[in-house]
């Protein structure tokens, strides 16, 4: 028979075993909690990474879109500038072609005007009063009105200082007067179209 020492009972061993079991349970719960929280943290990290990646992708897409808009805008501005230059060139070329055509027509009509003026100069006062002469005079005046509306005007010659830009000296004369280099007679009238000479005046100059 086993003796029981004084102050010691068989029940004293149970609290120690209970504490060991409690510690083990706590460790297991902590491990379980850690194992459960780890996937959650990983999922959160993955979600955050995906969100960051999406944001970066959006920024990249936005940046590419802005670059494309700037490129198209720059191309549009270049095309507008080129079109404006083309339109200005076309207007200048059209104006130049019109002036060349107008000058050509005026040069062909001027001999007709010269003949009408010579014909009137050769008529007597009585002949100028005939219906035929008056009809021709009306046509001549209408023609000169059309010239004026087009910008065609005669060059002033007699009494003006000789200017080779407007006058063509075919004869020279000398006298005792102090006047020199003055146009004293006009053989053929000259004309200007706007600011350019269509035909120089044929004149006699006093030297």
Image: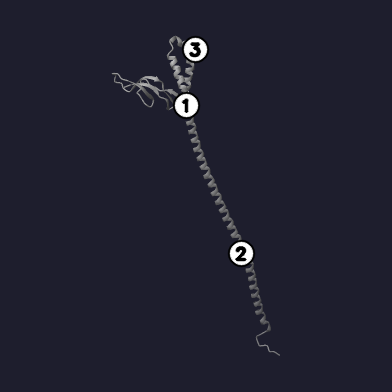
Disc 1 vs disc 2: which is toward the camera? 1
Q: Give the structural element (helix, strand or loop) at label 1.
A: helix
Residue 14, position as x, y percentages in the image: 67, 80
Q: Nearer the viewer, residue 105 or 24?
A: 105
Residue 203, position as x, y percentages in the image: 37, 21
Quarter of the image for the C terminus: give it: top left
The numbered mark, 3 or 1, whose residue comes first in the sequence reads 1
Within 10 Å of the Cα at label 3, are there few (<14), some (14-19), or many (20+) other Cα atoms? few
The numbered mark, 1 or 2, whose residue comes first in the sequence reads 2
Q: Which mark is residue 6?
A: none
In the image, residue 36 above or below residue 168: below
Image quarter of residue 5:
bottom right
Within 10 Å of the Cα at label 1, are there few (<14), some (14-19), or many (20+) other Cα atoms? few
Residue for point 54% across, 49% down? 67
Within 10 Å of the Cα at label 2, are there few (<14), some (14-19), or many (20+) other Cα atoms? few
Q: Is residue 145 left or right of residue 62?
A: left
Residue on which the image places disc 1: 104
Residue 172, position as x, y percentages in the image: 33, 21
Residue 44, position as x, y percentages in the image: 61, 62
Q: CA distance from mark 1 to mark 2?
A: 92 Å
Quarter of the image for the N terminus: give it: bottom right
Residue for point 63% across, 73% down? 27
Residue at the farthest right position:
1
Q: Which mark is residue 42?
A: 2
């Amino acid at each position: 028979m086993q003796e029981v020492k004084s102050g010691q009972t068989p029940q004293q061993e149970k609290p120690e075993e209970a504490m060991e079991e409690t510690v083990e349970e706590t460790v297991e719960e902590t491990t379980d909690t850690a194992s459960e929280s780890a996937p959650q943290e990983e999922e959160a990290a993955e979600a955050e990474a995906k969100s960051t990646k999406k944001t970066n992708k959006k920024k990249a897409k936005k940046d590419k879109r802005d670059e494309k808009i700037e490129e198209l805008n720059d191309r549009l501005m270049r095309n507008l500038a080129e079109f404006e230059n083309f339109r200005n060139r076309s207007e200048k070329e059209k104006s130049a072609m019109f002036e060349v055509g107008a000058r050509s027509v005026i040069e062909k009509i001027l001999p007709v005007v010269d003949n009408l003026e010579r014909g009137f100069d050769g008529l007597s006062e009585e002949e100028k009063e005939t219906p035929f002469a008056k009809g021709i005079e009306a046509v001549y005046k209408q023609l000169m009105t059309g010239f004026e509306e087009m910008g065609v005007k005669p060059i002033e010659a007699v009494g003006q200082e000789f200017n080779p830009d407007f006058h063509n000296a075919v004869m020279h004369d000398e006298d005792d007067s102090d006047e020199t280099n003055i146009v004293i007679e006009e053989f053929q009238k000259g004309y200007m179209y706007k600011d350019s000479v269509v035909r120089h005046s044929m004149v006699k100059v006093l030297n």
